[in-house]
Image: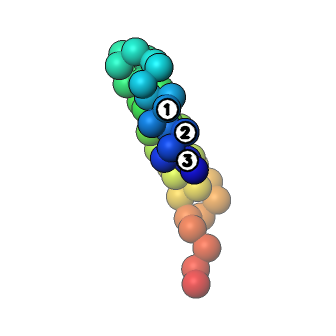
Amino acid sequence: VGALAGTMLGRRLPERQLGRAFAVVVTALAVFLLVDVLVLGGPPGG
């Protein structure tokens, strides 16, 4: 379902806007992982 929605959305948005949105998602994920490792002690051990 997510891939289908992404394909439909990708056809409607300009390429430049899609690039910026992707950059925001990647940056947010990187910040989350950095905070997880530095502040929270990393991922939980299995």
Q: Quick one: label 1 or label 3, which is nearer the N terminus?
A: 3
Q: In front: 21, or 26?
A: 21
For marks 1 and 3, give the one nearer the viewer.
Answer: 1
What numbered label is drawn on residue 5? Answer: 2
Q: How far apart are the alpha carbons under marks 2 and 1?
A: 5 Å
User: Label 1 is placed on what type of residue?
Assistant: Met
Q: Residue at x 40, y 15 (%)?
A: 14
Q: In front: 18, or 20?
A: 18
The residue singled out by tag 3 in the image is: 2
Q: Residue at x 58, y 84 (%)?
A: 46
The residue singled out by tag 1 in the image is: 8
**Pointers 2 and 1 in contact (C-beta within 8 Å):** yes
Which element is circle 2 on?
Answer: helix
**Pointers 2 and 3 in contact (C-beta within 8 Å):** yes
Question: Residue 40: percent from the left, percent from the top?
Answer: 64, 59
Question: Residue 4: percent from the left, percent from the top?
Answer: 50, 44
Question: Is residue 40 visible to the viewer in this orientation of the structure?
Answer: yes
Question: Residue 35: percent from the left, percent from the top?
Answer: 57, 49
